Image: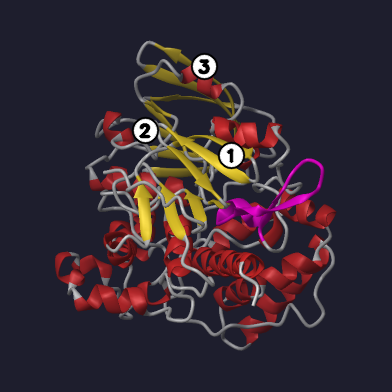
Amino acid sequence: MQPKPLPTSEQPVVAIIGGGVSGAGVAYHLARADCGERPAIVVFEPRAELGRGLAYDTADPAHRINVPAAKMSLQPDDPGEFLAWFEARDAVAGDPEARQPDGSLFPRRRLFGDYVASLLKPLLENGTVRHCRAAVTAVERRAGRWSIRDDGGGVTEADIVAIATSHPPPAAPGRLASRLAAHPRFVADTTKPGALEVIRPHDRVLVIGNGLTAADVIASLAERGHDGPVTTISRRGLRSRGHPSVPQELFGDFVSSAAHSAVSLLRGIRAAIGAAKEEGISWHGVIDQVRAQGYDLWQALPVAERRRLVRHLRPYWDVHRFRIAPQVEAVLDAAVAAGRLDILAGSVADARIEGELILCTLQPRHQRQPLERSYDAAVVTTGPAHGGILETQPWLAALAASGHLSLDPTGLGLACTERSEAIGPSGIADPSLLISGPLARGTFGELMGLPQVTEHAFFIAGEIAEKLRTSATNRHPA
């Protein structure tokens, strides 16, 4: 169902491209903000409901939130809202495995999407927020406004645009995509519905990558009854860590004398982990403190040091910061114990199709001798291809070509100011074009975890509200 035509009066129009948690969060908070005069808010999202995005639009029962429900919320000032929503519906009755021995809850991911959608529903029903169920095909600057075309044939004129699209899908390393594309069990994008259905119960599976997505794939295959051997291969062979058995206190102070280099930051974190251990606090408390102070830490680092951190330390940060749900960790532990899961550090040097087999040459890290292995299936889980964001959608590439967007120098997304205003190749920011969510990581640092994404959505809504108030004052001076 397409939204009603937007007003033709002086009512300002805010267009949000992307209706996942980030875009839905901006719409939700903007609808509740003091904007001077109420704007028309339209969200472009092809999915049937707002607030799901890639992460929370899954029906796979093996996919669980990897943060305790008590820390999940669309409200930065009410972190327990989702937990209250979940318990009010007695949702654990249909998913007894959600509750852990310590009482914490790790529900299936789709439920968080249900929660966000429920918050947007009344705003959609009363017309405060409009859902354009279509994909954007073009965004152009015309006569001081933004003209947005969608694949439903619609054209929307907007005063302010917030880009809240998802990070790009993973890209198979090297020539793998072209070499294996013709194989029926080569899964290049696990986000596509039913992507893993081609894998048979006894197949030997190669998983390229070893982060959260790889863990999800292994858990999903186990849920489907897969009992064949699985090999994961990643550059460093690092496996995502789990949560502590009991909650840990935050430990350390990384802001008072903030590090100005990646090396000094690393030394400070290692020293804090050692000091925490002496006080009976695990590394989790230190990493959580780094995350909590992440914005200030990131701002203290020069761009060259940010790039060095991303290049050398990001894999280690990711496996400690983005932890797997206990249920998923149990599946991985059982597979390792049974000898069905082999975790390798290295790379796929070559691969080819021979009949029904995928023949791979694996190059282990720090070894000269390669390994020759045969698999029945291969799955790419290498993480978002941030460097290719502009090529993922033609309208993004067109905005870059017309001087409105550029890649962030750290390679984590799109360049923007500390007010999240998009920066073009000339270095000039556009106050009417904002970047919301993970694509703003290069400027804001930690912007992948749900708490940070919702905080940023709240921040973006506040920035837009301030712009609208200023515009209203200029149009109608006292």
Residue occupying image coordinates x 42% and y 59%: 24
Q: What residue type is disc 2 on?
A: Gly
Relative horizontal placement of residue 262, taking residue 15 as reference (left or right): right
Q: What residue type is disc 3 on?
A: Arg
Residue 84 image-quadrant placement:
bottom left
The magenta-colored residue range is: 420-441
Q: Secondary structure at mark 2?
A: loop
Residue occupying image coordinates x 59% and y 70%: 469
How far apart are the alpha carbons under marks 3 and 2? 36 Å
How far apart are the alpha carbons under marks 3 and 1? 19 Å
Residue 444 in the image: x percent, y percent? 67, 62
**Of 35 and 109, which appears nearest the observer?**
35
Report which residue position mark 2 lands on. 152
Report which residue position mark 1 lands on. 385
In terms of sequence position, does the residue under pointer 3 or pointer 2 come before the other?
2
Up the image or down, 375 lies above or below 280; here it is above
Mark 2 crowd level (few <14, some 14–19, many ≥20, 10 Å Cα):
few
Residue 123 in the image: x percent, y percent? 33, 64
Q: Nearer the viewer, mark 3 or mark 1?
A: 1
Report which residue position mark 3 lands on. 179
The answer to if 430 sits in the magenta stretch is yes
Q: Secondary structure at mark 3?
A: helix
In terms of sequence position, does the residue under pointer 1 or pointer 2 come before the other?
2
